Image: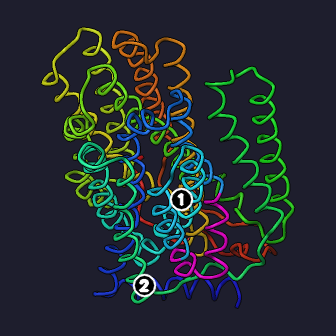
Amino acid sequence: MTTTQNIAAAHGTERAAAAPPRAALTVILTSLAYFMVTLDALVVATALPSIHRDFGGSVDTLQWTVNAYNTCFAAGIITAAALGDRLGRRRVFCSGLALFTTASAACALAPDAGTLIGFRAVQGLGAAAVVPLGLTLLTSAFPPDRRGSVVGIWGGIAGLGVATGPLIGGAVTQGLSWHWIFWVNVPVGIAVLTGARLRLRESRGARTRLDLPALALVSAGVACAVWGLVQGPQAGWGSARVAGSMALGAALVAAFIAWETRAAEPMIPLRLLRAPAFSGAVATQFLMAGAIFSAAFITSQFFQFGRGDSPLGTGLRFLPWTAMPLLIAPAAGALFDKVGARRLVVPGLLLQALGFAWIVHLAGVGAGYGGYVPPFLIAGAGISMALPCVSTSGINAAPPAWLGKAAGVLNMAQLLGYTFGTAIITAVFNGTGSLASPVTVTHGFRSALAVSSCLSALGAITALAIRSARKQQGSVSPGRPGELPAHQTLPPVQPTCQT
């Protein structure tokens, strides 16, 4: 099949798949899968102190419980997206669901920290297929002028996972035990897997050869970089193993880029990364994820170790913040289709930065919980404005044949941001505070959350580069299978911002 035929087939798939009720089922099933992955990350964050008490260790052990998952998640995303394009997006999506669900049950039965960390890594591999391919299946089922709305719904249902994650994690941990937080994934995973196999339409990317050297280089490079990030706070950023891991990761990623410039069928078309509409979305995704997840990680520790709240109480206190995406993200997605990304993302991330800065001040003056509600609402409203728009603007910058690749890069940026943010604020916390007493916890928390606020503000700055994808259209070098021919520009999309 030629590239032109692939593009035409992709457009035809969009039109056919967008017809109800299959389109509605696509939204529901992919959103539930995203809900499951989001819920898993946040229930674990709330349960970390209880895991720490059962298995012992330091805050470093807590971070590895989170980052074993993130390392494999980040390292596997691009590979999963490429396999989905080649083998079938629904097939790889379902395989990821099966792996994630099975690993969740294994985590629930883990008898020690090492086993838990190992199966969390397996969960990450499953999630690496679930999230990018779920987004690809969703966006390929709708034309560009409707993607903002459906991604808003997708993000809103995932927002339910954000809202209920700390609450469910706290309630289950306090009422039963932390082992049970992993069981909640099992019925959801089985239901989504069954529905996906029966009702989702299969789709593929361009019929290109699987680039095995590129897969090995990018997976190993990202894994080394993430490992260095999570080891940095414990071993020291200047230690030989951390510096060596980061240098090796950078070298492998550089080798991957060099390989891609010469590959006849590149795994990630570098033209896509050169488009400001896409690269701006990638940079913003990285910083936005770093801000929100680092803040969730450190705030959970502050409420339990610094303020003495129970796991359930921590989940309830998070609700003014974490419930906002459920309420606002669908509306923000619909508004995106009319006004574009920049008018929503820039003020949204600035509002989140303001909310975090306000919380830093309140922690310093010993405010009661009531004082935290307004900044939580502000931060939650801000991130809700940005969440559906950043991904959609990046997806809209890509032609149909590259949707899987675009989703893979965006989701890898999100996971790298998550890991980077958590590593940086852990290093700041360890440098300025400790878990020794509420006073030292509070001191470290304030410094760490200030970093999260800065990451959000930086995300607002990079979002200024997200311009209308239509203005970035141009020809792609001819003669490369899987890329657009020289005479064909990127397909028209709805504006991603107002310039």
Q: Is residue 342 above or below residue 192?
A: above
Residue occupying image coordinates x 54% and y 13%: 431
SS for dot 1: helix
Magenta highlight on residue 442: no
Nearer-the-camera pick, 430 or 172: 172
Nearer-the-camera pick, 199 or 378: 199
* Inter-mark Cα distance, 1 to 2: 23 Å
Q: Quadrant of the N terminus?
A: bottom right
Q: Is residue 456 above or below residue 258?
A: above
Q: Which residue is mark 1?
A: 123
Q: Which residues are magenta?
A: 76-94
Which residue is farthest left? 370
Q: Quadrant of residue 5?
A: bottom right
User: Does the magenta stretch mainly form a helix, a strand or a loop?
Assistant: helix
**Kind of residue at badge 1:** Gln
Mark 2 surroundings within 10 Å by alpha-carbon count, few (fewer than 14), some (14 through 19), many (20 or more) = many
Q: Residue 44: percent from the left, percent from the top? A: 40, 46
Q: Which residue is mark 2?
A: 200
SS for dot 2: loop
Residue 315 left/right relative to 490? left
Count the labels in the image: 2
Question: Is residue 276 in sight in this rendering?
Answer: no
Q: Quadrant of residue 485?
A: bottom right
